[in-house]
Amino acid sequence: MPAPPCASCHAARAALRRPRSGQALCGACFCAAFEAEVLHTVLAGRLLPPGAVVAVGASGGKDSTVLAHVLRELAPRLGVSLRLVAVDEGIGGYRDAALAAVRRQAARWELPLTVVAYADLFGGWTMDAVARSTAGSGRSRACCTFCGVLRRRALEEGARLVGATHIVTGHNADDMAETVLMNFLRGDTGRLARGGGLGSPGEGGALPRCRPLQLASQKEVVLYAHFRRLDYFSEECVYAPEAFRGHARDLLKRLEVVRPSVVLDLVHSAERLALAPAAQPARPRACTCCRALASRPLCQACTLLDGLDRGRPRLAIGKGRRGLDEEAPRAGAQPPPSAALPAF
Ligand code: SF4
């Protein structure tokens, strides 16, 4: 049976049905609709003002590749300029190939690219070294906990290096729903309360961040990359199979079968969550090591690095952080270079 005509242009044959609406579109009309929706997200949320210098967190994966491509298409209408910032976490057998994809994109799209490395920013610590250290303490599953915190710090550093005024990341609706679910499952009300909305305005001197693809489903991100013939790196990080996120992803996939709207429902519910006054986290203060905003004496990045440097990474995560707070700072403790920023 031949494909129906495209419901938008009525000229070409439809090449897909949009996962949410069921609308049958040709590839060109789907890509145009996808870009228009991202433009609407950015304009309605006032995410990127005209004149903004935007650092795009580029990993070489599908999400950041699609984000960079769409923003490059929209940049003249938004009046913004783009810089690609990639983070080299030091993950052997994974990140080098992903960075090669980012370099190809930067060359093809004529966008300036800056790469910042954990090893340079965090006293020689790479993710492979962190994994060895956490495995020795029986917490190898914590790799992504360390990486998520350090990556955020590294991206901030890279964005400042290139003179950016704003940071954008490629998180899509599925990523956000997984994060909301993980925060619920962990009982992390502080993160739940902070995680709603399309980004953060840049508290404590940090650069404003936003997620223009936050309302786009993962399926449509993949379809956009397919129809625009984008070159991206699709292998999974070697540490990803151990991450808690995988369990949230599996659960969401099963829930989507019986309730297709579950991903967006979770994203929107997080936007509307409000903590009771008694449950509000304490007002953030300056980290005693790097002056970044922190809810404890040390910010998350300094706590993790402190635990690693002491050879006690297990103490640096979860409730173990209290143990480090109560100990004197290790002798000669230095803030990571990036932590000199008034961020977080
Ligand atoms: Fe880092 Fe985990 Fe992502 Fe790998 S999967 S890049 S360790 S956050």
Image (cartoon, helix red, strand yellow):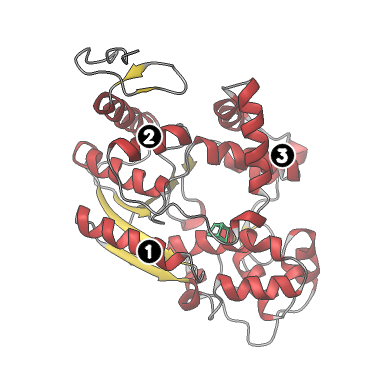
Q: Residue 267: x, y in percent?
A: 56, 31
Residue at (28, 28) in percent of width and height: 27
Label annotation for residue 99: 1
- Residue 49 position (above or below residue 3): below
Name the N-terminal-most of marks 1 and 3. 1
Query: Does residue 261 appear to the left or right of 94 in the view shown?
Result: right
Q: Is mark 2 within 8 Å of ligand 1?
A: no
- Residue holding disc 3: 184
Label annotation for residue 33: none
The residue tagged with tag 3: helix, strand or loop? Answer: helix
Under mark 1, the amino acid is: Leu
- Residue 139 position (above or below residue 111): below
Residue at (30, 19) in percent of width and height: 14
- Residue holding disc 2: 223
**The N terminus lies in quadrant:** top left
The quadrant where ligand 1 appears is: bottom right
Gap in angstroms between the C-alphas marked 2 and 1: 22 Å
Of circles 3 and 2, the one toward us is 2
Residue nearest the viewer, comparing 156 with 220: 220
